Amino acid sequence: MYELQILGNSSEIAFGCMSLNGNAAENEYLIAQALDKGINFFDTADLYQQGEMKSNLVRR
């Protein structure tokens, strides 16, 4: 099993948001699971879901 390491203030593993879809409930669940596992580095861009993913992450 991989042990999560924190590098500075960011986790060593990033959560890639590009593959998330338009299902808000499913996306919330996946993001919550990542946060529960200690992941705090989310890779996102304005192109992902027309910028909605950035907005969703900020609300968390």
Image (spheres, rainbow, N blue to C red):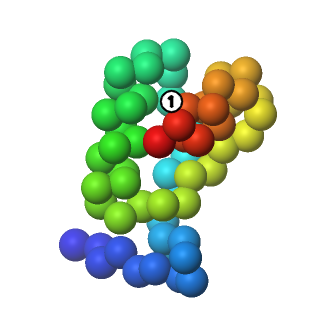
Q: 10 Å neighbourhood of mark 1: few (<14), some, or many (≥20)?
A: some
Residue at the spot 55% in from the left edge and 32% down from the top edge:
56
Would residue 52 be visible to someone looking at this image? yes
Residue at the spot 35% in from the left edge and 25% down from the top edge:
26
Give 14 or 59, whichever is nearer the viewer: 59
**Whole-percent x, y for residue 6 in the image:** 46, 80
**Callout 1, which amino acid?**
Leu
Image-quadrant location for residue 24: top left
Image-quadrant location for residue 44: top right
**Which residue in the protein does label 1 denote?**
20
Q: Residue furthest left?
A: 1
Residue at the spot 35% in from the left edge and 75% down from the top edge:
4
Give 60 or 1, whichever is nearer the viewer: 60
**Whole-percent x, y for residue 37 in the image:** 30, 60
Residue at the spot 53% in from the left edge and 37% down from the top edge:
59
Would residue 19 be visible to someone looking at this image? no
**Whole-percent x, y for residue 2 in the image:** 29, 74
Q: Is residue 55 above or below residue 60?
A: above
Quarter of the image with the N terminus is bottom left
